[in-house]
Amino acid sequence: MADRDGSTLLWFLAGLGVGALVGVLYAPKAGDEMRDTIRSKAQEGADRARQQARRAREQASEWVDRGRDAINQQKEQIRTAYEAGRQAYNETASVAASTGEPPKNI
């Protein structure tokens, strides 16, 4: 059993050595070049994330402005409707007062 464990360990080490050799032979770039590539890709990703965040802020700001405009438009319509109703009531009340009749419920 001890002989079998030693044989397994030797095969594992041999496989580890062959794998390291193949990795070095087929490595696309040297370590420094690979680190530089990784660093530049990370920088590109960070720049892209900043651009997306800026666009999201601009779009959110645009939506807030649109919402504010819609609310102001609704407030103006309500104000106009209120003033029209008030004016109609005052006209009805003044006509009723000039004729001596009580105002009619509208």
Image (tube, rainbow, N blue to C red):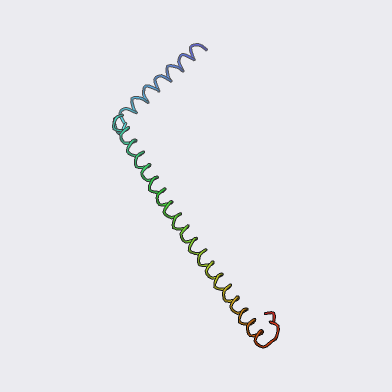
Q: Is residue 57 left or right of residue 29?
A: right
| Among the 4 quarters of the image, the one containing residue 90 | bottom right
Where residue 72 appears, as percent x and y from the top left, is 50, 65
Q: Residue at x 60, y 75 (%)?
A: 86
Image height of 68 relative to 80, above or below: above
Name the residue: 43% across, 51% down.
57
Q: Residue at x 49, y 15 (%)?
A: 5
Q: Note whether 41 is above or below 23 in the view shown.
A: below
Residue in the foreground of this view, choosing between 20 and 76: 76
Q: Where does the image place residue 73, in percent across and percent down from the top left?
A: 50, 67
The residue positioned farthest toward the bottom in the image shown:
99
Q: Nearer the viewer, residue 2 or 91?
A: 91
Residue lying furthest top: 2
Quarter occupied by residue 13: top left
> Which quadrant of the figure contains the C terminus?
bottom right
List x then y, in percent, for residue 82: 58, 72
- Residue 53 percent coordinates (x, y): 42, 48
Q: Nearer the viewer, residue 89 or 72?
A: 89
Q: Nearer the viewer, residue 25 or 72?
A: 72
Q: How many marks?
A: 0
Q: Residue at x 39, y 20 (%)?
A: 14
